[in-house]
Amino acid sequence: MSTLVWFDGEIRAAHEPVVTALDRGLLVGDGVFDTCVVVGGRPFALRRHLARLVRSAQLVGLPEPPVDLITEAALELAARLDGPTGRLRITWTAGPSAGGPGRGDGPATLLLTAQSETVLHPAPGTDPARARTAVVVVPWVRNENSPLVGAKSTSYAENVLAIEYARRHGGTEAVLANTRGELCEGAASNVFVELGGELLTPPLSAGCLAGVTRELVLEWGTAAGLPVREATVPLGTFRSAAHAAVTSATRGIVPVDVLDGRELRPGPLTARMQAVFAERAVQDLDP
Ligand SMILES: Cc1ncc(COP(=O)(O)O)c(C=O)c1O
């Protein structure tokens, strides 16, 4: 696995220091980011990920990220990776601090990192190496009224703690409800559940991130005639579901095989959706 860093117009080695010790992204998690998968040396769905980065920045009041510059840097980094698959992350922070918790008026910080990773799915939507996931519902909730809802914020510690909780309880992904007791999302994924012959995912009003993979599943699934839609799902209903899946850019569509210690079989709609996703994704790398 190799890591490349893009900062200030140049590709650098991973160990080279780039941001200052005063960067607000580092000090107070004041920044946004986005991550996409690299397939065949090209970032997948880059335009959608950049559109979300812009939305994230708007939501938290950061300046608008320079999309053209980021696109150029992302394409260059992805092409320079030493393997065909990997992940590419764009980080945009509030820049150097003026001291104290409030923002200064310094320039924002832009940083891109790319890592080659052979375990990533060769075609988005399919993940033979990480074909299943054990999920654990954590005791904390997502606040659907938080000012960070909808933003992919570098204030990620709640997700880190949720994943650590899941790991201590034998899982690989954590699932959170919201304050209303509805299914919300995974710590780093969106959640789908098969109920009554439909593939359902919570609406954005549940407080979940607008996942790019979730969006493509809804669009491509509907276009293929699959019964997939947004719906409010009580957490208790999710807990007793027969089939569920999580989605993310780096994992694709992954059936849940263990839910809070209970074994699940991959659902038939999930399998059909994986096939549709894999087929559409190879037709267009930037859908
Ligand atoms: C909290 C959260 N929800 C959902 C997702 C899935 O989004 P995407 O499909 O764009 O990777 C992520 C991705 O990391 C995430 O961090």
Image (cartoon, helix red, strand yellow):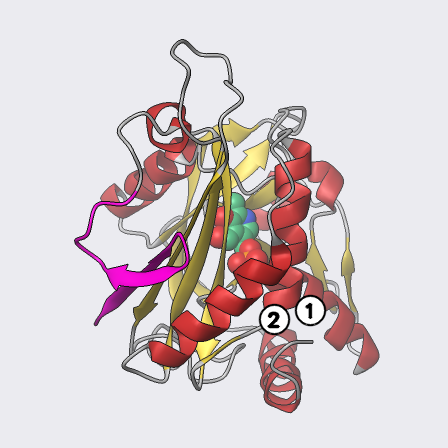
Residue 161 pos. (x, y %): 33, 34
Picture residue at 48% right of the left edge, 67% below the top:
74
Name the one closer to the observer, 221 or 258.
221
Picture residue at 67% right of the left edge, 34% below the top:
59
Whether 121 is drawn above or below 90: the answer is below
> Disc 1 designates what residue?
216
Whether 82 is drawn above or below 279: the answer is above
Residue 172 pos. (x, y %): 33, 55
Circles 1 and 2 in contact, beta carbons < 8 Å: yes
Quadrant in the picture for the C terminus: bottom right
Quadrant in the picture for the N terminus: bottom left
Looking at the image, tell me whether mark 1 or mark 2 is earlier in sequence order. 2
Element carrying mark 1: helix
Between label 1 and label 2, give the one nearer the viewer.
2
Instruction: Please give left or right for residue 230 compared with residue 212 in the image.
Output: right
**Residue 250 lies in magenta, yes or no?**
no
Asked whether residue 244 is in view, the answer is no
Q: Which mark is residue 51?
A: none
Q: Which residues are magenta?
A: 1-18
Name the one closer to the observer, 254 or 51.
51
Picture residue at 77% right of the left edge, 54% below the top:
230
The 10 Å Cα crowd at callout 1, few under 14, some 14 to 19, many 20 or more, is some
> Disc 2 designates what residue?
45
Residue 178 pos. (x, y %): 61, 32
The 10 Å Cα crowd at callout 2, few under 14, some 14 to 19, many 20 or more, is many
Element carrying mark 2: loop
The yes-or-no answer for disc 2 within 8 Å of ligand 1 is no
Residue 73 pos. (x, y %): 47, 65
Type of amino acid under label 1: Leu
State which quadrant residue 146 falls in. top right
State which quadrant residue 221 falls in. bottom right
* Real-space CA distance between mark 1 and mark 2, rounded to the nearest whole angstrom: 10 Å
